[in-house]
Image (cartoon, helix red, strand yellow):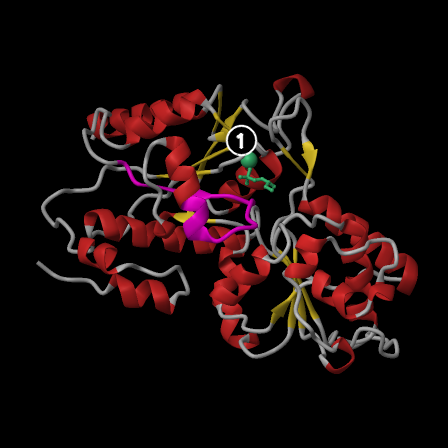
Amino acid sequence: MQRLNIQRILQRRGIGHVSKSTAGLCHFHATSKPPPLSFVFDIDGVLIRGPHVLPTAKRALKYLEGDNPFQKKIPYILLTNGGGIGEHERCDKLGAKLGFPIKPTQFCQAHTILKKFAPKYADKPVLVLGGERDVVKKVARSYGYQKALTTLDVLAWNPSVWPFHRLSEAERAVTESIDFSKTPIAAVFVYHDPRNWALDVQVTCDVLQSGGVIGGPYISSRGRTPPVELVFCNPDLIWRSDFDRPRIGQGAFKVAFQSVYRALTGSEYPHVQYGKPTQATYEFAEELLNLHLHDLYGAPNQFKPYMVGDNPESDIAGANAAKWSSLLVKTGVYEPANGPPAYKPTMIVEDVEEAVRWAVEQELAKTKSH
Ligand code: G3P
Ligand code: MG
């Protein structure tokens, strides 16, 4: 039996850390053939709504774990535009809620892809936005961005940067003493939904207008490559939580930021966008799925996966562009009452359970017709 060094492959591709036990597991079963399909699941609006697990989610995963006509584990990964905490912690929490273990090697959140670019910024000061207090700073440092800093660190340095917010005790407790007049910021990464839009818009404008040195003279980046890179990880304008109407997301923060920046400078700041539906994120997810399949069956993935999502603009648009099959559920952003979805899925289904059963039936029918 051939032994594959999944550990080296995953680390080389910046995809998570593999524990000894998982590496041991990679001793794959060449005897058992993988089933002819796999899934990529969105999270918000498909498996959970805010703190609540959708009942169909547990049934769908039970079906994929082996209680299906193929009587095999049907591989799946989770692909979310959410984030804000580390992959391991998120997998533990999700696994406990869903009742099935979710491994970091089958999980991709909005900022996971940034692991790939850590070497470029390993020892450079960067600003990370979003999430609670310094949680995202710790996540960025765990990816290899050793000098990740937050807008709370900036406010601790000089409260007059934003006179309308006074640091709470809890916020001050997680700040570091940095002299930002001597700390040029090389990039701004928006990891997750900012908690203080006004502070984050102000400080990001300061960084970009002054070429990295907050409070420094303004520079014009017209006609040249802007010195500071600006990266957003989730383009979702809206998403579905447990409130009756969709909630605005990180994409709305981007709109707010760019309109302020344009009002100040006359044009929007060039930026990089990751997250669904971007091609980079779907390629990253397909790599992760291939490795997960290797993990489970020791075989490369031969079939384009079924994407199950609730948001036509992100889940379905991205899956269609990646030539995957796409299943749109009615338990999240998409509401049939609003008319046909902006991006046509392979199939519209009630929920995730109907999605997995429909896809399995399709593949069963194909195997029978061969
Ligand atoms: O903040 C998360 C939201 O934008 C959507 O998450 O899981 O539906 O991709 P998800
Ligand atoms: Mg969703």
Q: Is residue 211 above or below residue 22?
A: below
Look at 37% across and 26% down and name the residue there. 58
Residue in front for this viewpoint, 47 or 326 = 47
Residue 326 location (% of width, % of height) = 47, 34
Q: The residue under label 1 is which amino acid type? A: Pro
Residue 83 among magenta residues? yes
Looking at the rendering, the stretch of residues picked out in magenta corresponds to 74-91
Does label 1 point to a residue whose CB lies under 8 Å from ligand 1? no
Q: Quadrant of the C terminus?
A: top left
Residue 155 sits in quarter? bottom right
Q: Is residue 123 above or below residue 134?
A: below
Q: Secondary structure at mark 1?
A: loop
Q: Residue furthest top?
A: 337
Residue 307 location (% of width, % of height) = 44, 37
Q: Is residue 70 above or below residue 153?
A: above
Q: Quadrant of the N terminus?
A: bottom left
Residue in front for this viewpoint, 176 or 365 = 176
Residue in front for this viewpoint, 47 or 147 = 147
Q: Which residue is mark 1?
A: 51
Residue 30 among magenta residues? no
Judged left or right of residue 20, residue 260 is right
Residue 204 location (% of width, % of height) = 77, 63
Total numbered labels placed on residues in the image: 1
Q: Quadrant of ligand 1?
A: top right
Look at 67% across and 75% down and name the residue there. 186
